[in-house]
Image (tube, rainbow, N blue to C red):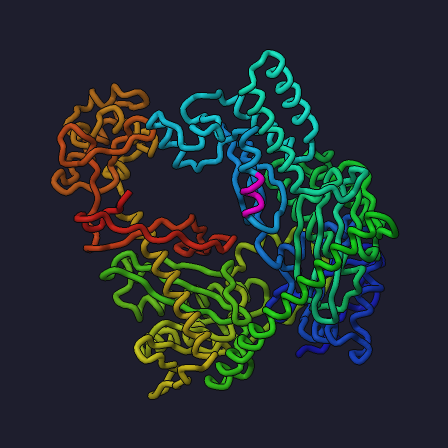
């Protein structure tokens, strides 16, 4: 616990101007971000007598080790910068808004050649228009099913669309007139896109136009006695009316507004919002707020508006909708309505209104409804918030108690000075010493933090892998904590001892004092990617017994890291091993602490196996053409498409290869030389006939068909292709940012070891 006087800025050093400030802890982690009209006045309030501060503010200032600030020109700029810093650093003492569920949206992929209507969750994608959010996915499907009678837009996946295109036959929806069947050319791309635009216009609230259009067509059909067509159009009108009725009119004046409500106590609160467009409720959403800082309801509302509309603005900017300072597009104007109705006015209402108006491109009115229909609707939203808070408390009571008990039991069993709020677990996965991969999973406060997951490709001393699991574990722990110590040295938290080099231990005894002062607004963004390993865990868990624990302990000792606890969890008897101990620690089978360690270990095991299977699968699809100098994937596909198979390409002369468009004499000679030195009996995998678009390769044992050659895999091997992973360092990778579930493994094809079924 630090004394705030040790890092208090010198008198007169803090400017009396608007700005944004951030407090950092001893590990340089940002723990709080705030804004102020006067930095001098606001920061001075934190350094008064501790007894005069709110308990949460006391906890924050005693956890901090330095304070930094950035001066901005206006209070609106301070509002935007505060939001961007909170989003970038996720400070633990700032108010946190968590969605109480993952809300589904109705999405139309207008960026595709043939737009698709579907239910989507998670991060928004470029080129896609969203409607919602909705409380239930079935509500979206019911609405779409009604509207497909009038707007038969494609709803099938890319795989179904491609298969129908190859077969020349549409799916069932094409036969029952609920899809215009663009897969078989019944409608042109332009006409189908116009159909998707009409669908979006109807969902956006422009319903009367389409009802009038169908009514006129129905009357025209009846006037020429085409009663069957008139009956179909009558049913279409009924479908539109039923879809419209699902969104009842709540505001008669056709208002566009977002109505917020807030209900809570001193510790947490529930927030609900109804999105009203053209007088109808088009979406509803809820959050649970943890009050980790001393804030009023007005400040909570201000933070809420920052999160809701700031996230939408960032998504639109990421999709290339507009750049900062340009007028709002139609999409941006649709995100921010003309009215924002709140339960309590934010303290800086004028600045918030100006910020929202800048995003919308026209005036936005932020106010508290006082009477009439809007006041009644706000009361309905408040009742929804009350119900959401009661439901959250019911769920949270048991979960929070259980996690606290598990951490306390681990602390007592391992004799730790504090509860292990951050736990890192490591596991090794390999097949007979090949494709060695290691995983690192992170649990914070007893919950998985998937954005912090990493995987490591084991290199070994010769670059061909480690000799066994203990050597691999030593390498992984060394690489992870070398990055941690190096980051501390780079930021000035440590000073290297004399004579140290890159592979020597760092002197952890000389800690440089954190410094307070003014910083640039964008400096941290450059270092954020390099400081992913800058935060140490309270406890390191390795999957294994005494050998693995000893290897990890040796790696930590070599780096001079002595402030991180270490243990191992052996699978057979679930024994907990500590470094240098002859006997394990035995936790009761019913212990919540043991259950948490098991979950951490099993998650590391799952993540390591997934990474190993991915690497092994990639290693089994390597082409003999990959090593040819100057020959890339595109020209490799061109060669295989021209000659039909690797066998025919191997038999071709330099002149024949050079005659292929895009090939020259030098590259052709390199191809012939590479194929001549390759083993024709057991060629490498992945040389697949390009063939016509979408066609699959034929069996490799037929001489006239493309050769599909693969390296052998162990009998019964099951492989899967998880989502793409981004490296944390050379050989290290991340779990997908959204933490979505990995696909189920595909079963091995019958009778063919190591091959995957279609």
Q: Does 423 sit above or below residue 116?
A: below
Image quarter for residue 31? bottom right
Q: Position of 192 compared to 605: left or right? A: right
Q: Which residue is rendered at x = 62% and y = 43% of the image?
A: 315
Q: Which residue is rendered at x = 31% and y = 47% of the image?
A: 618
Question: Which sits in the foreground, 736 or 263?
Answer: 263
Whether residue 713 is in magenta: the answer is: no
Q: Position of residue 526 (x, y in %)?
A: 59, 52
Q: Position of residue 565 (x, y in %)?
A: 47, 78
Q: In which quarter of the image is the C terminus?
A: top left
Can the viewer see residue 278? yes
Helix, strand or loop for the magenta stretch, by majority: helix
Q: Which residue is rendered at x = 24% and y = 26% of the image?
A: 668
Magenta stretch?
A: 138-143
Image quarter for residue 627? top left
Residue furthest to the right in view is 370
Can the viewer see residue 74? no
Q: Position of 304 compared to 532: left or right? A: right
Whether residue 142 is in magenta: the answer is: yes
Q: Quadrant of the N terminus?
A: bottom right
Q: Position of residue 133 (x, y in %)?
A: 62, 47
Q: Which residue is rendered at x = 18% and y = 30% of the image?
A: 705
How many numbered tags mark residues here? 0
Q: Position of 178 compared to 313: left or right? A: left
Question: Which sits in the foreground, 552 or 308?
Answer: 308
Q: Where is residue 162 in the image (x, y as percent from the top left)?
A: 38, 32
């Amino acid at each position: 616990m630090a004394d705030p006087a040790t890092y208090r800025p010198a008198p007169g050093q803090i400017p009396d101007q608007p700005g944004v400030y951030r407090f950092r802890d001893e590990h340089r982690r940002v723990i709080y971000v705030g804004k102020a009209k006067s930095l001098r006045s606001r920061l001075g309030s934190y350094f008064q007598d501790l007894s005069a501060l709110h308990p949460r503010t006391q906890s924050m200032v005693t956890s901090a080790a330095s304070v930094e600030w950035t001066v901005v020109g206006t209070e609106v700029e301070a509002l935007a910068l505060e939001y961007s810093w909170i989003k970038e650093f996720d400070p633990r003492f700032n108010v946190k808004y968590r969605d109480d569920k993952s809300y589904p949206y109705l999405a139309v992929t207008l960026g595709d050649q043939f737009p698709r209507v579907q239910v989507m969750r998670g991060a928004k994608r470029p080129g896609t228009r969203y409607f919602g959010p909705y409380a239930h996915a079935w509500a979206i499907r019911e609405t779409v099913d009604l509207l497909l009678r009038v707007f038969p837009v494609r709803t099938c996946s890319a795989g179904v669309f491609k298969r129908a295109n190859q077969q020349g036959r549409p799916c069932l929806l094409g036969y029952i007139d609920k899809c215009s069947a663009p897969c078989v050319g019944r409608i042109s791309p332009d006409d189908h896109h116009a159909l998707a635009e009409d669908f979006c216009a109807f969902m956006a609230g422009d319903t009367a136009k389409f009802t009038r259009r169908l009514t006129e067509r129905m009357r025209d059909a009846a006037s020429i006695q085409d009663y069957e067509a008139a009956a179909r159009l009558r049913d279409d009108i009924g479908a539109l009316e039923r879809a419209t009725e699902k969104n009842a009119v709540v505001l008669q004046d056709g208002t566009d507004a977002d109505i917020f409500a807030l209900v809570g106590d001193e510790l947490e609160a529930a927030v609900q919002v109804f999105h009203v467009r053209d007088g109808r409720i088009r979406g509803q959403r809820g959050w649970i707020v943890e009050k980790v800082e001393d804030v009023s309801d007005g400040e909570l509302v201000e933070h809420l508006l920052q999160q809701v509309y700031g996230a939408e603005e960032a998504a639109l900017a990421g999709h290339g909708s507009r750049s900062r300072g340009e007028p709002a597009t139609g999409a941006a104007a649709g995100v921010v309505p003309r009215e924002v109705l709140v339960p309590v006015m934010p303290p800086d209402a004028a600045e918030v209104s100006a910020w929202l108006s800048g995003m919308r491109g026209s005036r936005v009115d932020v106010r508290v409804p006082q009477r009439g229909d809007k006041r009644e609707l706000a009361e309905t939203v408040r009742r929804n918030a009350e119900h959401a808070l009661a439901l959250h408390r019911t769920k949270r009571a048991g979960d929070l108690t259980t996690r606290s008990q598990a951490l306390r039991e681990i602390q007592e069993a391992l004799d730790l000075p504090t509860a292990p709020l951050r736990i890192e677990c490591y596991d090794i996965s390999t097949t007979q010493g090949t494709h060695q991969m290691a995983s690192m999973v992170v649990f914070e406060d007893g919950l998985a933090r998937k954005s912090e997951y990493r995987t490591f490709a084991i290199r070994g001393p010769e670059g061909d892998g480690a000799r066994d699991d203990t050597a691999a574990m030593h390498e992984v722990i060394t690489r992870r904590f070398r990055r941690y110590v190096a980051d501390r040295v780079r930021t000035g938290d440590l000073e290297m001892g004399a004579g140290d080099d890159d592979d020597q231990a760092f002197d952890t005894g000389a800690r440089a004092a954190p410094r307070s002062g003014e910083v640039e607004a964008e400096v941290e963004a450059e270092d954020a990617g390099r400081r992913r390993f800058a935060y140490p865990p309270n406890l390191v868990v390795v999957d294994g017994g005494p050998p693995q624990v000893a290897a990890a302990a040796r790696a930590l000792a070599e780096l001079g890291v002595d402030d991180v606890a270490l243990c191992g969890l052996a699978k057979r008897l679930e024994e907990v091993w500590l470094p240098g101990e002859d006997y394990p620690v035995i936790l009761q089978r019913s212990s919540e602490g043991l259950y948490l360690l098991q979950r951490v270990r099993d998650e590391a095991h799952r993540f390591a196996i997934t990474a190993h299977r991915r690497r092994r699968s990639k290693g089994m699809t390597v082409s003999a053409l990959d090593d040819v100098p100057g020959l890339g994937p595109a020209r490799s596909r061109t060669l295989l498409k021209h000659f039909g198979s690797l066998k025919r390409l191997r038999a071709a002369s330099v002149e024949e290869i050079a005659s292929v468009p895009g090939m020259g004499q030098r590259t052709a000679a390199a191809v012939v030389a590479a194929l001549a030195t390759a083993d024709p009996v057991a060629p490498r995998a992945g040389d697949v006939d390009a063939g016509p678009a979408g066609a699959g390769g034929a069996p490799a044992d037929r001489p006239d068909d493309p050769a599909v050659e693969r390296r052998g895999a162990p009998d019964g091997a099951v492989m899967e292709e998880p989502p793409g992973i981004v490296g944390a360092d050379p050989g290290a990778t991340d779990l997908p940012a959204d933490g979505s579930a990995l696909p189920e493994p595909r079963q091995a094809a019958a009778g063919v070891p190591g091959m995957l079924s279609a």
